[in-house]
């Protein structure tokens, strides 16, 4: 069985990003994956301080909740990274996660992990695509395999519109693209890891 991990960079515990990532994970489970959800907003994770210890030892010198997150994603065959749009980009929480995941790049643990993006903005053209692109850039540098929401739409991943908590419950496109992203990631992860 493949493990598909969803990570939310929203500070809001029950916000729209969580809702769409959970939808994607539900679909991943239906397609045959083990799933796990991580909410960065609940964790204590400090920014990278560029001590470069990870380049010498392969481990981060900061002892906080990121250690467990790294362990969990080292064992993933599928990865879903989600963020609300903040000024056209990812949240500080997701960026800190990205920077602190540098130890995984020492031996390229995310190589060939089938990965995709979820983003939610309050406006229809609020920066969902630029936020997905920022996540895709990160995944490229980790040598992961990037997929979108697959055919028939086959766009950037899951993109939602909603400002208030739970607005995405009524966002048909957001829910559909999230469902399709979870299935696309799982189908390809199963194929690659046969
Ligand atoms: C600091 C900040 C910046 C934001 N910038 C944007 C933006 O550039 N475009 C947009 O559409 N929405 C923007 N929003 C709205 C959020 O993306 C939106 O409320 C989203 O639903 C939050 O996701 P969440 O419910 O998962 O926390 C911003 C919100 C905050 C707090």
Image (spheres, rainbow, N blue to C red):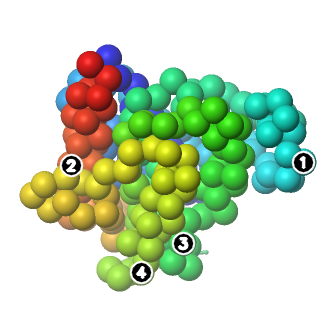
Quarter residue 186 falls in: top left
Vertical arrangement, residue 161 with respect to residue 119, above or below: below
User: Which residue is label 2 attached to?
Assistant: 180
Task: Say left or right for 166 vs 153.
Answer: right
Q: Earlier in the sequence, mark 3 or mark 2?
A: 3
Q: Earlier in the sequence, mark 2 or mark 4?
A: 4
Q: CA distance from mark 3 to mark 1?
A: 26 Å
Quarter occupied by residue 158: bottom left
Q: Pointer 3 and pointer 1: residues touching (CB < 8 Å)?
A: no
Q: Is residue 144 above or below residue 156?
A: above
Among numbered discs 3 and 4, the one appearing first in the sequence: 3
Badge 4 element: loop
Q: Does residue 83 show up?
A: no
Q: Which residue is mark 4?
A: 126
Pointer 3 residue Cβ closer than 8 Å to ligand 1: yes
Earlier in the chain: of badge 2 and badge 1, it is: 1
Task: Mark 4 vs mark 1: give the one in front.
Answer: 1
Identify the mark nearer the N-term, 4 or 1.
1
- The residue positioned 37% from the left and 50% from the top of the image is 146
Residue 169 found in image quarter: bottom left
In the displayed structure image, the side of residue 105 where residue 186 appears, left or right: left
Alpha-carbon distance for marks 4 and 1?
35 Å
Q: Are marks 4 and 1 in contact (CB under 8 Å)?
A: no
Q: Quadrant of the N terminus?
A: top left
- Mark 2 lies on a secondary structure that is helix
Q: Which comes before the other along the chain, label 3 or label 1?
A: 1
Label 3–label 4 contact, CB within 8 A: no
**Tag 1 residue:** 51
Distance between the alpha carbons at the discs numbered 3 and 2 = 23 Å
Res 89 label:
3
């Amino acid at each position: 069985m493949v493990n598909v991990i969803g990570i939310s960079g929203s500070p809001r515990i029950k916000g729209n990003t969580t809702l769409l990532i959970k939808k994607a994970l539900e679909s991943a489970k239906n397609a045959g994956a083990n799933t796990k959800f991580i909410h960065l907003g609940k964790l204590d994770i400090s920014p990278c301080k560029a001590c470069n210890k990870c380049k010498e030892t392969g481990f981060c010198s900061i002892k906080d909740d990121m250690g467990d997150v790294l362990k969990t994603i080292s064992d993933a065959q599928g990865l879903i990274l989600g963020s609300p749009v903040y000024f056209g980009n990812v949240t500080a929480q997701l960026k800190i996660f990205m920077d602190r995941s540098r130890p995984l790049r020492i031996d390229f643990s995310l190589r060939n992990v089938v990965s995709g993006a979820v983003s939610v903005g309050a406006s229809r053209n609020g920066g969902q695509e630029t936020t997905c692109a920022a996540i895709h850039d990160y995944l490229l540098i980790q040598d992961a395999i990037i997929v979108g929401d697959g055919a028939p739409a086959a766009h950037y991943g899951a993109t939602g519109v909603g400002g208030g908590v739970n607005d995405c419950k009524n966002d048909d496109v957001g829910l559909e693209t999230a469902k399709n992203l979870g299935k696309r990631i799982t189908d390809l992860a199963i194929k690659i890891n046969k």
